[in-house]
Image (tube, rainbow, N blue to C red):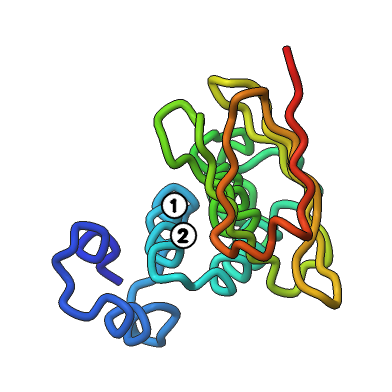
Amino acid sequence: VNLLAILAGLAEAPADLLARTWNRPGVLQLGGVFFRIHLLEVLHRLGQQNAVLLEIRQQWGAFLDAGLTTTAEYLPVNDDWWASVGHPWGASPSVYLIRSIAGLSPLDPGWTRVAVDPFLGDLRKLRVSVPTPQGLIEAEIYQTKGGVAGRIAVPQGVEIEFKEPAMRQRVEVVAWNL
């Protein structure tokens, strides 16, 4: 998969290119965690949140299955942990759990305005804390029969904009002072 060409806008049909090459027999696949941040970004930009969630579960779930509480340099191969198990570049899922799944992203520099567009897929509940220059944003988002609902606590002065206006009725926004 030529992820960098897709990210640079050089691929004429990025979704088609990804579909033809990602996880296909005979095509060189990503082996380590470092470059997977680019795959997660492509999936995010193409609006494929289910694929983001699946990739995180399959690849980083292996760390949890192995009993790790950190992110390793490489994904496990037959339980052969010959590499370091404390690498920050393996932590890219945290970005996409916030952006793609919890759906929190800055609309202005410094997170003074925040977009909210959660996608939980088959998750029943998600809780995230996002450190920002304004202070901590904490969100608890869950599935209900009426759609996504929850609570978001933001620092005083931070504005929240819901992509789906009706969500404002189901998600409580609480401002707190330092």
Q: Is residue 65 visible?
A: no
In the image, 27 versus 150, the foreground residue is: 150
- Number of labels in the image equals 2
Please tell me how crowded label 1 is: few (under 14), some (14-19), or many (20+) other residues with Cα within 10 Å: some
Q: Nearer the viewer, residue 84 or 172?
A: 172
Q: Is residue 172 visible?
A: yes
Q: Measuring 56% from the left and 48% from the top, which residue is drawn there?
A: 161
The quadrant holding residue 136 is top right
In this rendering, would 164 be left or right of 48?
Answer: right
**Residue in the image at 60% along x and 62% along y:** 165
Residue 6, compared with residue 23, is above or below; it is above
Above/below status of 84 relative to 102: above
Location of the C terminus by quadrant is top right
Instruction: Report if the CB atoms under discs 1 and 2 are less than 8 Å apart.
Output: yes
Which of 117/88 is in front?
A: 117
Name the image quarter holding residue 78. Answer: bottom right
Q: Position of residue 71 (x, y in %)?
A: 63, 42
Q: Amino acid at mark 2?
A: Leu
Label 1 residue SS: helix
Query: Is residue 131 positioned above or below 26 on the image?
Result: above
Work out which quarter of the rendered image holds the N terminus and state it. bottom left
**For residue 61, what is the image quadrant?**
bottom right
The numbered disc on residue 37 is 1
Q: Give the residue at x 39% y 70%.
A: 46
99 over 148 or under it: above or below: above
Identify the residue position indicated by label 2 in the image.
40
